[in-house]
Amino acid sequence: MAAETSAAWPLADAALEQELLDLVQQASHYRQLKKGANEVTKTLNRGVSELVILAADTQPLAILLHLPLLCEDKNVPYVYVNSKTALGRACGVSRAVISASITTNPASDLMNQIRAMKDKVERLMI
């Protein structure tokens, strides 16, 4: 099990995870959220992803390990949260969500919060 969790890096601590989930919830209300590995892959390929949130308890984790590589290619920060159930709730769905992408909208009121969160996530990756 330890090997599985080490692949889930960088992992948000409890406080950052709560902030991330709050931001995901707001992004969902602003229609700036894509859920699921396929949708996240599309936002990255289209260059509209600001931040990618992945679930560390995904089984098998390998089904989303292509995303960090794609994020690095596209210079998009990514971060793991502990629970796909919590991520799903933050996305406003009753199912578990293994990955979510907060998308770009320069006119959005959320841009400052997204920018601040990206800075925090990028500091985790150093």
Image (cartoon, rainbow, N blue to C red):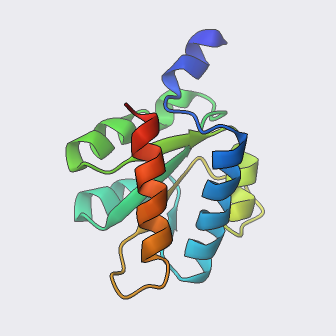
Residue sitting at the far top:
2
Residue furthest to the left in view is 73
- At a point 49% along the width and 29% down the height, the residue shown is 9
Q: Is residue 12 above or below residue 89?
A: above
Left/right placement of residue 97 relative to residue 43 reads: right
Residue at 52%, 81% (x, y): give it.
31
Residue 31, above or below 12 = below
Horizontal side of residue 58 vs 93, given as left or right: left
Q: Is residue 38 visible?
A: no
Left or right: residue 44 versus residue 93 is: left
Q: Is residue 93 visible?
A: yes
Residue beneath the point at 50% across and 42% down: 79
Residue at image location 65% in from the left, 57% down from the top = 19
Q: Could you say where residue 51 lies in the image, as x and y percent from the top left?
A: 42, 56
Quadrant position of the C terminus in the picture: top left
Query: Is 77 or 54 nearer to us in this picture?
Result: 77
For residue 57, what is the image quadrant? Answer: top right
Q: Quadrant of the N terminus?
A: top right
Residue 67 x/y as whole percent: 38, 42
Percent x, y for residue 46? Answer: 24, 65
Q: Residue 5: x, y in percent?
A: 60, 21
